[in-house]
Amino acid sequence: MEQSDGQIPNRSHPKIQPPPHCFNGAKIVGKHPRMLELLELVEQVADTDATVLIVGETGTGKELIANALHQKSNRWGKPFVPVNCAALPEHLLESELFGHVRGAYTGAVEDKPGWFECADQGTIFLDEINDMPLPLQLRLLRILQSNCYSRVGSRQIRHCNVRVVAAANRDIRQLVAAGHFREELYFRLNLIELHIPPLRERKSDIPMLASYFLHLFGKKHQKQQLHLSRAAKKLLLAHDYSGNVRELENIVHGAILLAKEHVIQPCHLPVHVHRHQVCNNGKWLPFQMAKKRNIEQFETDYLCNCLRASHGNITQAAQMAGLHVSNFHHKMKQHHINAATFKA
């Protein structure tokens, strides 16, 4: 779902517009109505200083949306600083966010600015804000209220002008009710709330996303002629993606590395993607339906392996399979297999 070249767009030429859903070279791919509605909201609130809370499951692209908010705002030429609040223990996270002075704790051998200081005049993105410890939530609340903070170990009050964009992969209202998140901070962060739908709720975007990743990683690995077979596309559409767009990205990237011809077949996809052949949306399939799907998959893989071994020679592949050439042709047509893609 995302890829950035790290360059700042040239605003001195207003007639030159980036392609749709493209922010500083970072592409947000999707035409599902819920994604179009989300992107419209991004355009609407980007050029303000309002705090924004982005809610979505892991792997949906929350940092990409945060970066888009920054790139479309009047802070576009200033720093965009992403911080993962779940990646560090409390004492280190406090120092990373607000900085520290020499001698503040063991190992603090020199003064060090924090990420808020580094993000001055720009945007700080606090990912997984739901995991921020309660004491740090108070310090964050102070910055949101007064734009003031102090480095760890110092009483000197510092000022910053930073837009705060936060993201959560859990329902913060439930954390507030359980006493794990401060209600006043939630309301401060939640001036504007953006919801990113999980990939399983916008499956119509899967072919477009897969094509984007095929182009992106195909170019990287010099395999630019690759495309998905019908059977592989079927498997990708049936999968539920607990890891969302990031999982699809990894699946396509791995398939590109495994593919030796110009077509990505089901055999190039990881084992867990094939689960829907016996289980679909959490429900066990009837025996006959599961059997039919597995037979189709076996035939596709078997024919592809024969063609691969014969370098696309159909006559030799049919002999290897013990089938008449016309029967082999029929099964190739049935499973949408092109022998030309297996030629050396």
Image (spheres, helix red, strand yellow):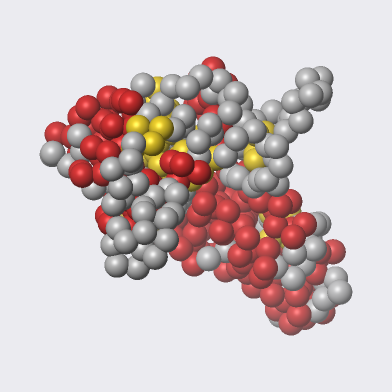
| Residue 14, quarter of the rendered image | top right
Residue 113 lies, in percent from the top left, at: 45, 49
Residue closest to the eye, 180 or 58: 180
Residue 53 lies, in percent from the top left, at: 39, 31
**Going 27% across and 39% down the picture, which residue do you hit?**
139
Q: Is residue 67 left or right of residue 169?
A: right
Q: Is residue 344 left or right of residue 309?
A: right
Residue 62 lies, in percent from the top left, at: 47, 40
Whether residue 262 is situated above or below residue 207 in the rendered picture: below
Whether residue 117 is situated above or below residue 328 in the rendered picture: above
**Going 72% across and 76% down the picture, which residue do you hit?**
306
Q: Quadrant of the N terminus?
A: top right
Can residue 86 be seen here? The reply is: no
**Going 28% across and 32% down the picture, which residue do you hit?**
141
| Residue 266, quarter of the rendered image | bottom right
Whether residue 104 is situated above or below residue 24 in the rendered picture: below
